[in-house]
Image (cartoon, rainbow, N blue to C red):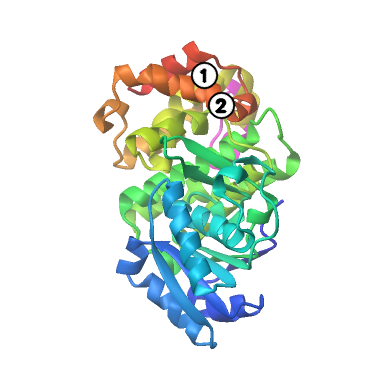
Amino acid sequence: MTTPRLIVKAGGLDDLGTLIAGLGVTRALVVCDAGMVACGFAERARTALAAVGLAADIFGNVEADPPMTVVNRAVEMATAFGADGIVGLGGGSSLDTAKLVALAARTGQPLDDMIGTDKATGQRMPLVQVPTTAGTGSEVTWVSVVTSESHEKKAIYAPQLLPDIALLDATLTLGMPRHITAATALDAMVHAIEASTSRTRKNVLADTMAEKALALLAGNFRRVLEVPSDLAAREQMLLGATLAGMAFVNASVGAVHALSYPLGAGFHVPHGHANALVMGPVFRFNLPAAEAEYARLATHMMPGRSFASRSHAAAALIDEVEAMFAESGLETRLSKLGVTEAAIPDMAREVVEKIARLIAANPCDMDLADVQALYRKAL
């Protein structure tokens, strides 16, 4: 299950109007955040739409870990504008919001009624997703994650959320700040690794995509940090992130994501950074059950490197992702981001009680005490 059409083209944003008009759209709303407006990408998208005679408007107020109230405002704007097509432009929060707008603005179903799996009804309007970060894979997944009024992350899984087209234009990632480049890349690598170790939906298709994703991401990670203007490397990262998204949507993610959600909702740690903060402790916890998979992935992540044994290869994979995190310039300790010892019990309880679907997919069982201990290792 994935997006039916994937276009990889530098400068492809200029083709946006032709692409969405081909889906029968006459009035398109561009859904993005204020950064996309400030840097001119939103206006470029509107210009591309207008160039083929489409009416276009911009909702430029998406927020990180999108609050449901913001998503609802975007739905209201789409309805008032009479949109019959949606463009998602930006990082994961914008793409997740765009998917929900495309569905809710057509069906009228409240977001609260969609939370969970296959709770959405009706069909969305045409949707084109244009990622500007190489990380979330939201352009090829059937899930949107929003933040409730009680500051809890809620996931909506519905096949209707898969867009019609994912447009990968690497030129849009050239100006991405170093910390966002690093955090989104680490997020994508976690997607690939967790997809390969899923207990619930692991499959050969997801494994194959995860292998290729890790090869592209790890092979270009340091290059894009050292030479941010390298368009070829940027494109490889963007494609790697999309493949990692395809991998996890067909398999599932696990405890890294489960532990990261309270960090985003409660402490506003960006999703990719939150994953990076807890991935080392979680991967080491999972090592007894995941050693074979980690070892297999290590050969794709570090091609040409020889390993003395399967255990050596598996440990090397964890060492390598932790090394990349250390080199990224991102803060590596939870305590430096406002997370306190006192917050750990409530975060752990949320993971075990409310994000159980991801713990079920984790290769090792994990109880409340385990989650607390893992948070403390990252503190």
Q: Position of residue 42 (x, y in %)?
A: 40, 71
The quadrant holding residue 272 is top left
Q: Position of residue 267 (x, y in %)?
A: 33, 34
In depth, the one of 326 and 352 nearer the eye is 352
What is the number of the mark on residue 314? 2
Q: Is residue 222 above or below residue 52?
A: above
Judge whether residue 305 is colored magenta.
yes
Q: Which residues are magenta?
A: 296-313
Tag 1 or tag 2, which sits nearer the N-term? 1
Secondary element at tag 2:
helix
Residue lying farthest to the top in this orientation:
369
Q: Position of residue 14 (x, y in %)?
A: 49, 79
In depth, the one of 159 and 221 nearer the eye is 159
- Specify few, some or many for label 1: CA neighbours under 10 Å numbering under 14, 14-19, or 20 or more: some
What is the number of the mark on residue 285? 1
Name the residue type under label 2: Ala
Observer-side mark, 2 or 1, equals: 1
Q: Is residue 341 left or right of residue 69?
A: left
In depth, the one of 136 and 17 nearer the eye is 17
Q: Quadrant of the C terminus?
A: top left
Residue at left offset 60%, top offset 29%: 295
Secondary element at tag 1:
helix
The quadrant holding residue 333 is top left
